[in-house]
Amino acid sequence: MRNRTVLTGYPRLMGTGTSMGDRVVDLPATAAAAALARRELAATPGISGELGYKALLMTSELIAVYVQAVEPDPRLRLALAIRVTPERVRIEVGGPEPDVSPDTLLHSSETPSLGGMGLRIVDRMADAWGVNEDHDTSMWFELER
């Protein structure tokens, strides 16, 4: 976990620099959330090419942590926060606290189906990533442009 930090609150959209675009998108806490999030990211100016590929993949992996153990219920919601600056792209996915902690998922070699491999992908691909914990939880990553 070379770049992981823990902060409080969600979604924060913290960062420095002039923002080219900030937005928060409401998503259902269902398997459909990943496809909806990918569509939002693909339509976001400044997220394309290799950076876009990484952002789409890692966002899908973060969403999987939230929806893996949730019974499909469109009343449960996730928040996708997107910030694009000239220096970086920051993506946050937030919602109710997952049943399994991100640390457990990251370090689990026995349960990759629980999302552990996904968080390993985020750990390897992101320039920085972390978990915000409060009464709700969000996970975020940043990619330098």
Image: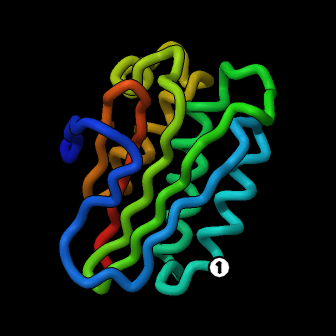
User: Residue at 55% across / 32% down in the picture?
Assistant: 65
Quarter of the N terminus within the rendering: top left
Give coordinates of residue 45: x percent, y percent: 53, 86
Locate residue 31 relative to residue 22 in the image: left or right: right
Q: Amino acid at mark 1?
A: Ala
Measured along the vertical axis of the image, is residue 144 above or below residue 101? below
Image height of 113 relative to 128, above or below: above
**Image position, residue 49 (x, y; %):** 53, 82
Compared across the picture, whether 133 is left or right of 59 comes to left
Q: Please identify the quarter of the rendering in which residue 75 is found.
A: top right
The quadrant of the rendering that contains the C terminus is: bottom left
Q: x%, y% of residue 80? A: 54, 54
At label 1, counting other C-alpha atoms closer than 10 Å, the crowd grade (few under 14, some 14-19, many 20 or more) is few
Q: Closer to the camera, 65 or 84?
A: 84
Residue drawn at (57%, 56%), measured in percent from left and top? Answer: 57
Q: Is residue 41 above or below residue 20?
A: above
Q: Which residue is disc 1 drawn over?
A: 43
Question: Element type at marker 1?
Answer: loop
Residue 18 at x, y = what percent? 26, 84
Q: Quadrant of residue 78?
A: top right
Which residue shows up at 59% across the image and 69% down it?
Answer: 41
